[in-house]
Amino acid sequence: MKKIVLTLATVMAFGFANAQDVKFGAKLGLNFSAINGLQDSDTKSGLALGGFAEIKLNEKFAIQPELMYSMLGAGGKGSNDTVELGYVVIPVMAKYYVVNKFSLEAGPQIGFLASAKYAALESNKTIDTKDFFNSTDFGLNFGANYDFTNNFSAGLRYTAGLSDVFTNQYKDLTKLVSGKEEKGTNSNIALTVAYKF
C-alpha cells in the first residue's frame, strides 16, 4: 500500500516539475458497471464525480491524476436487486493528444471501498455487505476525450478490474451454499463531462 502511494506521489511530482501548463477541473460521469464472475448478475448504472489536474508535459503528452467518488456494483438478472459499491478512486492517466482537441488515455487506478450494500428493491430492504468486499481495488483504465472548448470536454472510459473484489468470508459462504468459490472483478464504462478552470 505504501509503495503504491509513493509511486503515485512520485509520478505526480515528476509531472508538476516538468509541466508546461497545469489546469484543474471537475468531472461528472455516468457509470455502467458490472462484477465479472458474479453469478446471475447484470449491469448497473451509477454516478461518478470528483476533480482532476491536467499536467501538460508538451503539446502532445499530459499526466492527469484524479480523485473521484464512483458508484459501482451490479444488477440482478430478471430482478430489481442490486449490489451497490461506493469507491473513492485515484486514477493516474497518461494522455496523448492525437490532434489538437482529441486525446487518448490509459493508466492505473486504486480504489478504496467506502460502502457496500445489497438492495432488494421489491421488499425495500437494504443490507450492509461491506464485510464481503475487499477494502482496496486495483484497475486499469483506457479512454478517449474530446475538448469542445478550452474549458469543456467529454470523455469515454473503460475500467478493467485487476483484483478480486470478494473477501474470503464471502468466498467461504458461497462455497458452502453452492459448492463453488466465486471470484469477481469490477468492470465499468463511464461517460463523463469535465470543466477545466
Image (cartoon, helix red, strand yellow):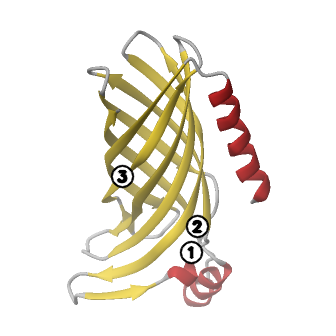
Disc 1 residue type (three-letter): Phe
Residue 19 appears in which quarter of the rendering? top right
The residue labelled by disc 3 is 49
Q: Position of residue 54 (x, y in %)?
A: 49, 30
Give the residue type that dot 3 points to. Leu
Residue in front for this viewpoint, 93 or 149: 149
Category of crowding for the residue at label 1, using alpha-carbon neighbours closer than 10 angstroms: few (below 14), some (14–19), many (at least 20): many
**Dot 2, crowdedness within 10 Å: few (<14), some or many (≥20)?**
many
Kindly identify the residue that appears in the image at 57 percent across and 83 percent down. Answer: 131
- Residue 66: x and y, percent? 50, 44
Whether label 2 touches label 1, CB < 8 Å? yes
Viewer-closest of 104 and 175: 104
3 vs 1, front mark = 3
Q: Is residue 137 left or right of residue 40?
A: right
Q: Earlier in the sequence, mark 2 or mark 3?
A: 3
The mark nearer the N terminus, 2 or 1, is 1
* Real-space CA distance between mark 3 and mark 1, rounded to the nearest whole angstrom: 22 Å
Q: Residue at x 44, y 21 (%)?
A: 103
- Secondary structure beneath dot 1 equals loop
Q: Which mark is residue 165?
A: 2
The amino acid beneath tag 2 is Val
Sequence-first disc among 3 and 1: 3
User: Which disc is residue 133 wearing?
Assistant: 1
Question: Which dot, 2 or 3, sits closer to the camera?
Answer: 3
Q: Quadrant of the C terminus?
A: top left
